[in-house]
Amino acid sequence: MGWDEARRLAHGAGRALPTVVLNLAEALGAVLAEPLWALAPLPAVDTSAMDGWAVRGPGPWRVAGRTLAGDPPPPPLAEGAAREVATGAPVPYGDGVVPYEGGVLLGDELTAEPPRGRHVRRAGEECAPRTAVLDAGSVLRPAALALAAALGYDVLRVLPRPGVVALVTGDELLTSGAPGPGRVRDAIGPLLPGTVAALGGRLTALRHVGDAPEALAAALATAGGDLVLTSGASSHGPADHLAGALAELGAQVLFDGVDVRPGHPQTLARLPDGRLVVGLPGNPLAALAALVTTAGPLLAGLAGRPLPALGCARLTDAVSAGPGTRLVPVRLTAGLARPTGHAGAAMLRGAASADAFAVLDVDTPAGGNVRVSPVY
């Protein structure tokens, strides 16, 4: 299967999860299931944008009283009167606010250039009541959650971030210490939490599983989650048991292998209970390529988001594509994609200094345009 077709199929396989109600602290990265409406004007009353004095009339002004943020709105000012105000404090009816640095106060007499309505945040300036400030389908990033809080929301109805369980296979893997003869340090386990989060999921469990076929089948059967990631068992070698485990569990295999380097031996399947399985290669860069190819679009579909868009850049160096699609780690700077090197399937050095994969379908000269997909 071609790389673009695999991305589209994976996205379509991810049917949006049921909506849930989450508090703001839990909703980061989720997708709004309904528009976010302003419950009241924001700000609710006219407030000061500066520390200074609210004034009325042409000046000079006689200063009396002070209003701080959180105080009730003061009465309107009389002609020639001023009132000290803090940033965010409700301002009395008047002609604007004179900042501290813009006025001279001698005793209780203030002189300054008339503010002519400046430095006041008017009631409803940001949004009026019953205004939709975010559309359904918006991803709840930190600023969106802050806006929801400012509008008075405590909970939101969302399409949740999919739960992901990872099963890292391999009897040869170490989880601590230096590698040695016949043993290698697990690099995929540390890769997954941040990558899954950046792709819109939440890693709920990471387990190490031995190479026995019955161990993988049992782990898949009991893994839970909306998506199960496996690594190191997706090819067709003597220790690669994913295909047999999926068959034993009655899974529907949507594709087995993608015409991409690195990352060719990747699998997408659906278990009878609806959980989805993505089989990642055991080599670290190949696993990252498979996450970008299959898991990213799949998680987007499960979360109710569109297929992740690809960018465009110009290569600084000529790169050969070879057969099928080639993913090359690159560093993006001002629209240029510079290959980072060290791009073998088992290598991570190139990816560690990259921020995207260049997606090559044909040999591309220096200066040629390429599609780019972020490296998470």
Image (spheres, rainbow, N blue to C red):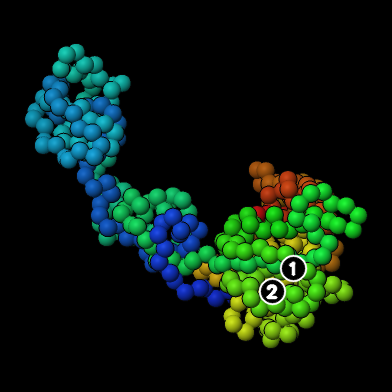
- Name the spot of residue 374 as percent of width and height, x first: 65, 55
Of 63 and 65, nearer the camera is 65
Of 47 and 72, nearer the camera is 72
Instruction: Give the amino acid at mark 1.
Output: Val
Q: Residues within 10 Å of mark 1 (few under 14, many from 20)?
A: many
| Residue 14 appears left or right of 244 | left
- Name the spot of residue 269 as percent of width and height, x first: 68, 78
Of 315 and 33, nearer the camera is 33
The image quadrant where one finds the N terminus is bottom right
**In the rendered structure, are the residues bearing label 2 and label 1 in contact, judged by CB atoms less than 8 Å apart?**
yes
Q: Which residue is mark 1?
A: 209
Q: Helix, strand, or loop for circle 2? A: helix
Q: Which residue is mark 2?
A: 219
Instruction: Give the amino acid at mark 2.
Output: Ala
Q: Is residue 228 visible?
A: yes
Vertical arrangement, residue 246 with respect to residue 56, above or below: below
Of 356 and 84, nearer the camera is 84
